[in-house]
Amino acid sequence: MNRTFLEFEKPIVELERKIDDLKLLQQEGIADLGDEIAGLEKKLKKLQDDIYGSLTRWQRVQLARHPARPYFLDYVRYITENFLEIHGDGCFRDDPAIICGLARIKGKSVVLIGQEKGRTTKEKIKRNFGMAHPEGYRKALKVARLAARFGKPLVCLVDTTGAYPGIGAEERGQAQAIAVNIKEFAHLPTPIIVVITGEGGSGGALGIGVGDVIAIMQYAYYSVISPEGCASILWRDASKAPEAAEALKVTAQDLIELGVVDKVIPEPSGGAHRNPNEAASILRDFILGEIDRLSGIPVEELVKKRIEKFQGMGVVKRDI
């Protein structure tokens, strides 16, 4: 059982621990506790449904950031075969915050791009907590063009608080790198599937987030700014992040209603961090289904619809 939990998950974790203790006693032959365990498991299911079915937007943001939530390399391990990483932007250096490569998913050849936050302190520093520099976005574009050249579907898994805002990144053209990617991804003649798996932070997400289908996992979020950043600007108080999250409407359901994303990918009960293997299986099936669907559409039509999709976002039509 995952021992890392958020404050609102505490009642669930306490009940799970009680069930584990009873199962241990039963395994040791101390007593027959089958009926009691079954009753507690039924109670646990109801408790999970009640808690996760009534989460605030801020609590969903917290779930998207859960330290045990699967990251890009976890999904690579769970759903792909023969992953071959491609390094470097061909200009400056390799950015470990963005990982690109060739892989197979149930025998289908794909090109993968994703942001990786890292698990250990050493990994987090190496990956810059998933915040890419310009060379990361240029590497992503290099690999995306490779996918288009060989007619391979491109799958982008987004999970970042945002692009790195450091001086060096700005000096090397952070904004330009993201802008160029948005333009180029819009015109790539190959199917592109984008999934926000955790955090979808602003331009950092958009740099690899233009595609034919934009999907978001059930407890992920996607926003022009983090709730803390928004609260700091509006109220000069980052502690008002919960109020900012409500105003920003960052959740999967909000984004479907706003037309920003196309589909919501369900997660296991309680979120992907509670059952990463099942979450990966659901994601894999979604990706394969979209590859089959998009592969049947001529690339000229794909590109045309892709551009129309993004041009239509934010447009308000009024009867005059």
Image (cartoon, rainbow, N blue to C red):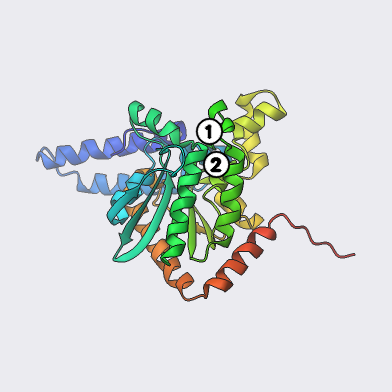
Residue 195 vs residue 276: left or right? right
Q: Residues within 10 Å of mark 2 (few under 14, many from 20)?
A: many
Q: Is residue 299 above or below residue 128?
A: below
Residue topped by disc 2? 204
Closer to the chain start, of discs 1 and 2, is 1
Q: Is residue 143 above or below residue 95?
A: below
Query: At x 38% / y 49%, what residue is drawn?
Result: 45
- Residue 254: x percent and y percent? 61, 51
Q: Is residue 280 left or right of residue 32?
A: right
Q: Tag 1, which secondary structure?
A: loop
Q: Position of residue 238 (x, y in %)?
A: 62, 25
Query: In the image, is residue 289 above or below residue 246?
Result: below
Q: Which mark is residue 243?
A: none
- Return the mark for residue 164: 1
The front one of 228 and 113 is 113
Image point 39% across, 52% down: which residue?
Answer: 268
Residue 198 visible? The answer is no
In the image, what residue occupies the spot 40% across and 54% down?
112
Spot occupied by residue 192 in the image (x, y as percentages of width and height): 49, 61
Residue furthest out toward the right? 320
Residue 201, image quadrant = top right
Find numbered disc 2 in the image and state the secondary structure of the residue it sits on. helix
Above or below 74: residue 316: below
**In the rendered structure, which amino acid carries the disc numbered 2?**
Gly
- Total marks drawn? 2
Q: Is residue 22 left or right of residue 313?
A: left
Under mark 1, the amino acid is Tyr
Image quadrant in which the N terminus is located:
top left
Residue at left offset 39%, top offset 41%? 69
Contact between labelled residues 2 and 1, with CB atoms less than 8 Å apart: yes
Classify mark 1: residues with Cα within 10 Å, few (<14), some (14-19) or many (20+).
many
